[in-house]
Image (cartoon, rainbow, N blue to C red):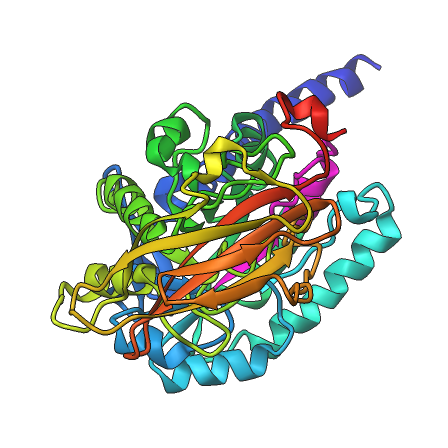
Amino acid sequence: MSSHFSSVVILKSSILPLLILLAGACSFKASDDQRYEKMGRKVEVVKDGDAYTLYKDGKPYFIKGAAGYEHFDKVAAYGGNSIRVWHTDDAQRILDEAHANGLTVMLGLWMEREREGFNYYDKDDVAAQKERLRQEVLKYKDHPALLMWVVGNELYAEGSNVKVWDAVNGVAEMIHELDPDHPTTTTVMNVPEKVVNLIKRRCPAIDILSINAFGAMHNLADELRETDWDGPYVIAEFGGRGYWEAYTTWWYAPIEQTSSEKAEFARTKYERTVLVDKDRCLGAYVFMWGYKYETTPTWFSLMTETGEETALVHTMREIWTGQQDFNKAPHIAYLTIKDIFPTDQVYLQPGEDCIAKVYATDPDGDTLQVRWEVLPETVSEDGNAIKEEKPDVINGVLGTSDGTQVSLKAPKRDGPYRLYAYVYDGQGNVAFANFPFYVKAGNTFSSALDFY
């Protein structure tokens, strides 16, 4: 018994240094110095001191990106180099078209979210989702346009189950096994400290943090430094102020910036974050390149349904190329109803006659034409989960127009509405503004409670 005990002690003593050595090796392998070492992969992030650089085919690659599914030719023509999409629906067409235009693709792998009913405690469902994504990775991993994999989009929204991040890490690990040539990322909205810290702790296979940021982008770099994430990041969506960040009317209709305001707003955010923090920021994707109905038909649309371009398209063209010698979009100063501004809580009686005016100029002196329309107000929804459609135009409420002003007869039915002005320059450019108003029979309202 004594002899047996001695042998056990000797055995433990001999194993202990080996375990320490292995633990040290694992720790080194997981370090950033090893993780972001230059390995000669097709796409990789390399760390040099405290700075990170994205490399593609051995050359530094700063992302000049557009988030959207159309007009890839314009991205390339205006100096952009990358596209961001959220899922693999129509991925072959997207990858092929991007490649034909010399662009890369930040390709989304859509993971279900608990707010839409998915349960990350259900091991079978999680495994089935992972297998589905495995097939997508195998299908597209060798495409020459692929830049990186986006594992889920804003998965934490209204959910606190940390199993979500275990699933994200499992998918990212699977990607590294199948496709070591392309980095992995996952997206958050703004910089929620607890969520970012969870990603750092539970998702070691995520190489890059992607951030969707709009109005909150102004101090993003500083906020990120307050978290545990000390690696590289990408701005995966940015643009004008989001509808969830906007001032609202008494009836909670968000007040939208004009397209002219959005262009300057986005430029300032880009210059103060992306261009200032190049040691960690690998680039950005402007949102939404093309047309998208979300809350309004104009909120995120950088173009009209027929392809006319707003000032934000031209802002990105200037940023990407440094050029300014092209025809610019019109500029809208403001839009009024009854000489009142949207922030002044405009209400109308059913059938009331009034005048709306748009104050617009053109930097190139082009002749301007205005198209007006009135739509019923729609409830703001999460654009990731809800595919909103533009409601039918309210007919019979717009009268004579001399271009910059129009006669408006309030709809007969009570409720919230929105007036839109689209200003065209005849050169393929547009500016737009809208005005939320409320129709209600009765006396003047004195507070928000009067609407309920």
When the figure is inspected, residue 34 is found, relative to residue 332, above or below; the finding is above
Which residue is painted at 23% across and 45% down in the image?
Answer: 271
The total of numbered circles placed on residues is 0
* One can see residue 289 in this view: yes
Query: Nearest the camera: 301 or 38?
Result: 301
- Residue 24 appears at what percent x and percent y? 47, 32
Q: Is 209 situated left or right of 102 in this image?
A: right
Magenta residues?
148-168
Residue 358 appears in which quarter of the rendering? bottom left
Residue 167 falls within the magenta-colored stretch: yes
Q: Name the quarter where the C terminus is drawn.
A: top right
Asked whether residue 107 appears in the rendered view, the answer is no
Spot the residue most to the top. Answer: 2
**Relative to residue 116, is residue 425 drawn left or right?**
left
Measured from the top left, where is residue 445 in percent x and y? 64, 26
**Is 98 or 369 nearer to us in this picture?**
369
Q: Position of residue 119 (x, y in %)?
A: 83, 45
Viewer-closest of 133 and 189: 189
Query: In the picture provided, is 299 more to the left or to the right than 152?
Result: left
Q: Quadrant of the N terminus?
A: top right
Residue depicted at 40% across the width and 77% down the height: 72
User: Which residue is rendered at x = 85% and y = 48% of the image?
Assistant: 123
Is 120 contained in the magenta span? no
Query: x, y (%) of residue 113?
Result: 73, 48
Q: Residue at x 34, y 28 (%)?
A: 222
Residue 69, placed above or below residue 212 = below
